């Protein structure tokens, strides 16, 4: 319950900020609209010459695009801005103040900044997924929906832990300003397509090194009936591994951290 109160407090501050700076929200809506139109037009061009793309139909890819919007919205809502604030706090010494608060430091560091304008991507993502599923003609029973939600949660957890691992390196290497921007560029471009369409040598990279496959492709496979039981178990196992690894790395970094006064 205490963790939920902390998250609610940060969310309230974020909402107050967006009310104060409404232009940011308008810009986010426009950007989301432009991005969606661009991706849909790209699909229409591709599927004028083919019926499927490595087993993915246009409607399947529409579902994937919606999931990409949704995950991007979640990351942009709290994870990425909080990780950026964490790295800046370590560099400037303001991270010390966060350590004095009576709550888990990882939770505070991971939720200290909320950017509500990113919620536009969440809304767009839900709408696109719903529309894409309706076009596929597939009937989702409770089991299929549960499988999708589990893989979606596992995918988001994997991305969060990956970003936390990258950001935690700031305890050792101060100048890492561009590392999150590089990930965002890679996720923003490669994440819009199923990993299965990439060359064989690139698929392991986008699956285990930069876990785009588990964040976007696997949940999309769950909704479109392409996911195997083995794939679902692997998604959960990878998420659990990333959770354990990122937590352990965070605790090691805290023990090493000597504070701004050192």
Image (cartoon, rainbow, N blue to C red):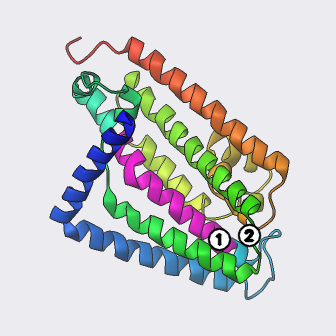
Residue with the most extreme left position: 20
Residue shown at 58% from the left, 32% from the top: 243
The image position of residue 37, as x and y in percent, is: 51, 81
**Between residues 98 and 199, which one lies in front from this camera angle?**
98
Q: Quadrant of residue 256?
A: top left
For disc 1, the marked residue is 63
The image position of residue 55, as x and y in percent, is: 83, 70
Residue shown at 59% from the left, 49% from the top: 153
Question: As drawn, is 230 to the left or to the right of 76?
Answer: right
The image position of residue 242, as x and y in percent, is: 61, 33
Q: How many marks?
A: 2
- Residue 78 lies in magenta, yes or no? yes
In this rendering, is residue 248 above or below 81? Answer: above
**Between residues 209 and 74, which one lies in front from this camera angle?**
74
In this rendering, is residue 145 above or below 111? Answer: below
Query: Distance from label 2 to label 1 (Cα)?
Result: 13 Å
- Disc with the residue nearer the chain's start (2 vs 1): 1
Q: Quadrant of residue 2?
A: top left
Q: Main secondary structure of the magenta part?
A: helix
For disc 2, the marked residue is 140
Residue shown at 65% from the left, 34% from the top: 240
What's drawn in magenta, residue-wise? 61-83
In what quadrant of the picture does the N terminus appear? top left
Q: Secondary structure at mark 2?
A: loop
- Residue 234 lies in magenta, yes or no? no
In this rendering, is residue 67 above or below 94? Answer: below
């Amino acid at each position: 319950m205490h963790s939920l109160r902390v998250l609610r407090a940060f969310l309230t501050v974020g909402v107050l900020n967006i009310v104060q700076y409404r232009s940011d929200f308008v810009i986010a809506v426009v950007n989301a609209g432009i991005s969606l139109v661009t991706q849909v037009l790209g699909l229409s061009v591709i599927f004028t010459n083919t019926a499927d793309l490595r087993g993915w139909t246009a409607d399947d890819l529409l579902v994937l695009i919606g999931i990409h919007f949704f995950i991007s919205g979640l990351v942009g809502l709290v994870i990425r801005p909080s990780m950026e604030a964490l790295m800046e706090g370590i560099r400037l010494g303001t991270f010390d103040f966060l350590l004095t608060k009576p709550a888990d430091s990882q939770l505070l560091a991971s939720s200290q900044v909320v950017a509500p304008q990113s919620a536009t991507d969440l809304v767009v993502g839900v709408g696109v997924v719903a529309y894409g599923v309706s076009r596929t003609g597939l009937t989702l029973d409770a089991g299929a929906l549960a499988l999708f939600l589990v893989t979606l949660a596992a995918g988001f957890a994997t991305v969060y832990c990956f970003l936390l691992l990258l950001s935690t390196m700031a305890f050792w290497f101060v100048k890492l300003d561009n590392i999150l921007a590089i990930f965002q560029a890679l996720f923003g471009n490669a994440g819009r397509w199923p990993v299965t369409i990439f060359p064989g040598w690139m698929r392991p990279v986008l699956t285990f090194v930069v876990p785009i496959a588990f964040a976007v492709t696997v949940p999309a496979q769950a909704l479109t009936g392409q996911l195997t039981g083995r794939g679902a178990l692997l998604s959960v196992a990878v998420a659990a591994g990333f959770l354990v690894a990122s937590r352990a790395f965070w605790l090691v970094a805290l023990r090493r951290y000597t504070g701004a006064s050192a």
